[in-house]
Image: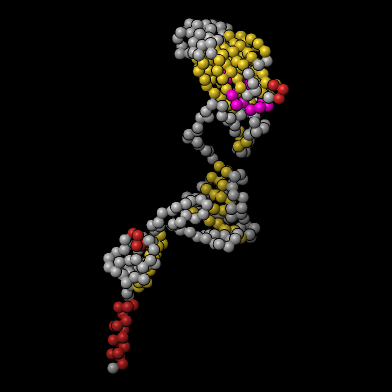
Amino acid sequence: MRKKFILLCLLAVAPWAYSQVGINTSNPQGMLHVDGGKDNPSTGIPNTVQQANDFTVTSAGRVGIGNIAPTSNLHIVNNGTATSIGGGEATNTGLLIENPVTNNSILAILRTIGTTGIKQAVMGINPNFNGNNGAFIISRIPGGSDFAMDLTTGNIGVATNIPTNTLDVAGSARVRTLDVAAGATLITPVYTDPNGVLNKAVSNVYGTVINNTVNIASGATNTLITGIADGGIYKAVVSVSNSCGRVAVADYYVTNNNFNSAFSIKGINGLLNTDTTDKAPAFTEVNRNTTSVVWSGIPNCAGGTNTAFSYTLTMPSAGTINLTNNGNVSLEYRIVLTRIF
């Protein structure tokens, strides 16, 4: 009799031992199913909105958050819409790991000991890094160094896990597109030292460049460039050309000092791609603020005569250079100023 009673009890308990458990739902979709919002239907599969507040463990041991059919060991589906990024966590962040205690680490994937016995936190994908500063590593293979961040200095390394500068690239770099500075925008050149570290040369202003292009009618005067920095000494290059392939290029020294109106311009040399041996222009230095240039050997072409490339440069005030077209046709003039002191 006793044996029969035990058998009956086992038969009664067996279905419960293998049943699904639901919390806040009578319609569990996994071995354990928690309906946080109590909004799931009594029959059928919950829709996407209803699953958003659900937690599920399947018979395969997979865990779903916001998802009743997880396809990996942990499958999180964020069904909300983030409302902000930057100043704080987004309203509907898919995954947030936080330690609210000040100065405590938020996440350490691997806690290890460095070469000098100092503990460090190493994080990343395929990390195998043994140092004393801690690093965030992304590499294609364990021990690689495709991308690294030193967690002490904040330096970022590309193809190196020991970056010595804010950005340290152990290899070549490519910029596919660069903007062209319009008008008198100040451009600063960049140089490299023997270690490949980018620097400015001599000073923060040496080598800075501004440029402009303007079309000026015959006999007219217009501003060629303005916005030249005060206190600088420049090498200026002015070019003019026509549709017949003739190009005239002239060099000038420019000093620009507003104090005591100490600004001036002087012609140096030039080149005309002419058929004669007389390739240089003739400069007439009217005064320290004005210089005129005449080119010889220009053939009549496109309506222009041998005077077509002649012009006068004037500095009416500090920071500005005007051009008067002394030729007989409208032409486009280009100027580039490079600061030398």
Q: Is residue 158 rendered magenta in the image?
A: no
Q: Nearer the viewer, residue 10 or 335?
A: 335
Q: Is residue 227 rendered magenta in the image?
A: yes
80 in relation to 294, above or below: below
| Magenta residues (range) | 226-238
297 in relation to 27, above or below: above
At which x and y percent is residue 335?
A: 56, 21
At which x and y percent is residue 314?
A: 62, 16
Which of the image's four quarters has the N terminus? bottom left
| Quadrant of the image occupied by residue 263 | top right
Q: Nearer the viewer, residue 43 or 37?
A: 37
Q: Residue at x 27, y 65 (%)?
A: 44
At which x and y percent is residue 272?
A: 55, 12
Relative placement, left or right, of 141 versus 227 is: left
Q: Nearer the viewer, residue 204 or 227?
A: 227
Magenta region, main secondary structure: strand
Which residue, as the protein is rendered here, is positioned at the far right?
A: 260
Which of the image's four quarters has the C terminus? top right
At which x and y percent is residue 66?
A: 38, 61
Q: Residue at x 65, y 11 (%)?
A: 285
In this rendering, does residue 308 appear at all? no
Q: Residue at x 55, y 15 (%)?
A: 221
Q: Nearer the viewer, residue 192 or 53?
A: 53
Relative placement, left or right, of 25 versus 123 is: left
| Quadrant of the image occupied by residue 210 | top right
In this rendering, does residue 82 appear at all? yes
Q: Residue at x 53, y 38 (%)?
A: 172
Give the colour scheme shown: secondary structure
Which residue, as the protein is rendered here, is positioned at the far bottom?
A: 1
